[in-house]
Amino acid sequence: MIKLLNKNCKFLITGATGFIGSRLCYELLEDGHQIVALTRSKNKISGHQNLIYINNLSEHEFNYDIIINLAGAPISVYWTRKNQQEIYQSRLKITAEIVEKIASAKNPPKLLINGSAIGFYGTSDTIIFSENSYCTKQNLFSQNLCKDWENEALKVQEKLRVVILRTGVVVGNGGGIIKKLSLPFKLGVGGFIGDGSQIMSWIHIDDVMGVLNLVLDNSSINGAINLCAPNACSNAEFSRALAKKFGRPCIFHMPKIIAKTLFGQMGEELLLASQKVAPHKAIENGYDFKYVDISRAIQSL
């Protein structure tokens, strides 16, 4: 659970009804903080005296201690041109609005935590990416999206502390990859994609909250921080761990050509390519990961 050193902070949180956002709101409310949640979703958290919902930034006075910007349309869909535009604009538009508000604020927040993803680095079968790594020059949609999203948030880094969350595959109940894959694996027809050798950089939802607690409490942390466990796994290892969780075999697999046909560019960039990312900054700042093994992480759910 999140337990901050500073109590009774006022947060603006976008993407508050998403997988990470909803868990974050719950923990911050439990810790006694006030939340203004910007969302257009109808799947809202049950009423709480310290929680206010707004549909746009102008609905509430722009007076916050901390902003956490996680808004964005789901990315795990077939990337038609229309879907790509929605994925891109849903992130860049609200970030630009927040940046504009911060730039003109007489009393700006002390911290902006902005979403991103490990897609920033590009893909590689051999490179281990850390926060100081240069990104590969591959002109991938996921990579360009992350670059532009981060650059928009960093426009106000001279005015306040800005932290960028480069998030990997989040493992947890109620959302993310586990929610998407649970049914086929429960039915015994789940399996790995391609030859299963591609590397996945993952993180348990409990450790997402733990690293966020670290970022919120440690004012020396700024810039990018990787949200992923120290030990990445292969897609085959992940699939076997999930099958074991449900007491089912892992004997099926989806050939690469089928994955490319079904999922298109999204499949090539997010499902078939390797990304091995190390959480150097979190570890250097003293964070002790609760889950470092994918099998144990999945069994905990």
Image (cartoon, helix red, strand yellow):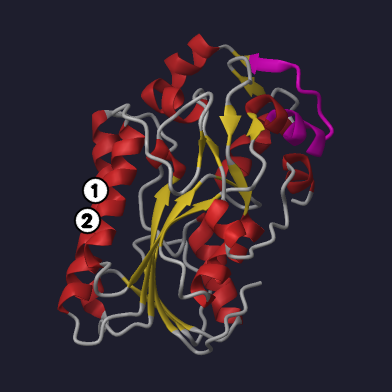
* Amino acid at the residue labelled 1: Gln
Left or right of 99 on screen, residue 109: right
Write the residue at 29% across / 38% down.
144
- Quadrant in the picture for residue 191: top right
Any magenta on residue 93? no
Numbered marks: total: 2
Q: Is residue 93 above or below residue 268?
A: below
Give whichever of 106, 15 is nearer the camera: 106
Q: Is residue 266 above or below residue 285?
A: above
- Quadrant in the picture for residue 266: top left
Give whichever of 8, 230 is nearer the camera: 230
**Residue 160 in the image, given as x and y percentages of width and height:** 30, 74
Circle 1 is placed at which residue position?
Answer: 89
The magenta segment is 239-253
Judging from the image, what secondary structure is the residue with disc 1 in?
A: helix
Left or right of 161 on screen, residue 35: right
**Spatial separation of the CA atoms under disc 2 and disc 1:** 5 Å
Verify CB contact (< 8 Å) between mark 2 and mark 1.
yes
Q: Quadrant of the N terminus?
A: bottom right
**Residue 258 in the image, given as x and y percentages of width and height:** 51, 12
Circle 2 is placed at which residue position?
Answer: 93
Judging from the image, what secondary structure is the residue with disc 2 in?
A: helix
**Residue 49 in the image, given as x and y percentages of width and height:** 50, 87
Q: Which mark is residue 34?
A: none
Write the residue at 73% across / 47% down.
297
**Residue 205 in the image, given as x and y percentages of width and height:** 62, 56
Left or right of 178 on screen, residue 112: left
